[in-house]
Structure formats: C-alpha cells, structure tokens
Image (tube, rainbow, N blue to C red):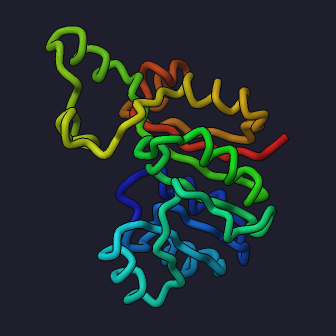
Amino acid sequence: MTQRSDLEHIIEWVPNESRVLDLGCGEGELLEALIDAKQVSGVGVDIDISNIAKALNRGLQVLQQDMELGLDNFSAKSFDAVIVAYSLQVLSQPHELLDRVADIGNEVIVSFPNFGHWRSRLALLLGGKMPKTRSLPYNWYDTPNIHFCTIVDFEALCRELKITILEKRTMGPIDVLSSLWPNLFAKSATYRVKRQ
C-alpha cells in the first residue's frame, strides 16, 4: 500500500481509533489502510466519480464533493485529523482550504511535492522548461499541479495563517541532506499542523 513515504508518516501520525477526514482520498487506499492499522472511523472526500466508485467498493464512507467549493458540511473540530495528501498543490485556492481545515480538525496532516528540489531548479535553469520527474511526470500544460509550492512557501503560509507546525518529515534520496537543507534536497514533505 505505502509506495509513497508520505503515506507511511501519515499512518504513523494518525491516532488509534480517531475520527479522520481524508480530503482528495482518491480510490481510498490510505483511508482503508488507516481503518485496518489504526481502527479509525473515517470519511473520504473526492471529486472524481470513478475514484468514489472504487472507494465505495472498498466499503468506505466517501462523499463526492469539490473541496474548493467549501467544506461547510463539516463543523469545527469534528475530526481528530484531517488529511490533505498530495492535494494542496492542485487547488486554485490552497491557502483557503488550509485555513478551513485547520478549524475542522484538531490536527491537519499535509503532504506535497517540493518544487524547490534541486533537480527541478536545475531542469528549469539548464533546460529552460518546467521539470518532469518520476513522481511528477506531467507536462506544464497537462499537469494537475497548479501551485508550485516549496517547503519554505508552505512554512511561510502556516505562519501567515497562524497555524503551528507540530512536526515535519522530509523525504529525499539522502535523508541527511533532506533534513539539513529540506528546501533544496527534499523531494517531498509531510507536516502535522494545528491552529494556534
């Protein structure tokens, strides 16, 4: 199940028997893993009807909903953890979603690809083109990623929204480098955050 290392961190951070909201849940693999490993009660949200159908076939509770149109059907602090895994960068107003989910959940777990990684910078510098990688194999014109966030950008946004970073994990091929200089060497990051 856990091909992406951010999923391992998310599973580790979600408390046992907690209430979880998984935004951009896709086909429900993470939510299913959390139910199996942590006995959570969870709800998934996705916009894609084919993802919803696959998640329902797994026996999951899911809603077809556009996160961008608001999450007014969820009240403040109605979940122990809200998960936004590899979804923030595809939203047109990611700051508004982050601000809202910090109210819905006691904690929020966010993961995203780091567009400040040295390979992305080098590809742009030397090739003059938007980078393509194994984890981000899209062309500039067909990518679902519309906001190219770096680790520094995300941390600045958290400060602006008065959201406290409780814990972060950075992932890269050399853990020491991605820990020391995450904005340059981490391919992705996972954060556990909370409203101050």
Q: Position of residue 99 (x, y in %)?
A: 69, 44
Work out which quarter of the rendered image holds the C terminus and state it: top right
Q: Is residue 23 left or right of residue 159?
A: left
Check the image and name the residue furthest to the top.
Answer: 126
Residue 137: horizontal and vertical position, in percent? 20, 42
Q: Quadrant of residue 15?
A: bottom right
- Above or below, 141 against 116 in this view is below
Would residue 21 be found to the left or right of residue 144 on screen? right
73 left or right of 181? right
**Quarter of the image with the N terminus in it:** bottom left
Q: Is residue 134 above or below residue 123?
A: below
In which image quadrant can residue 113 be found? Answer: top left
Above or below: residue 152 compared with residue 114: above
Residue 171 percent location from the top left of the image: 45, 38
Which of the pair 20/45 is nearer the observer?
45
> At which x and y percent is residue 40?
65, 77
Q: How many marks?
A: 0
Q: Residue at x 53, y 28 (%)?
A: 151
Note whether 130 is above or below 30 in the view shown. above
Residue drawn where x is 63% and y is 62% of the image? 71
Say left or right for 139 vs 86. left
The residue at the point 55 percent across, 65 percent down is: 22
Q: Which of these two is toward me, 71 or 150?
A: 71
Q: Residue at x 58, y 31 (%)?
A: 154
Furthest residue to the front? 69
Residue found at the very far right of the displayed protein: 196
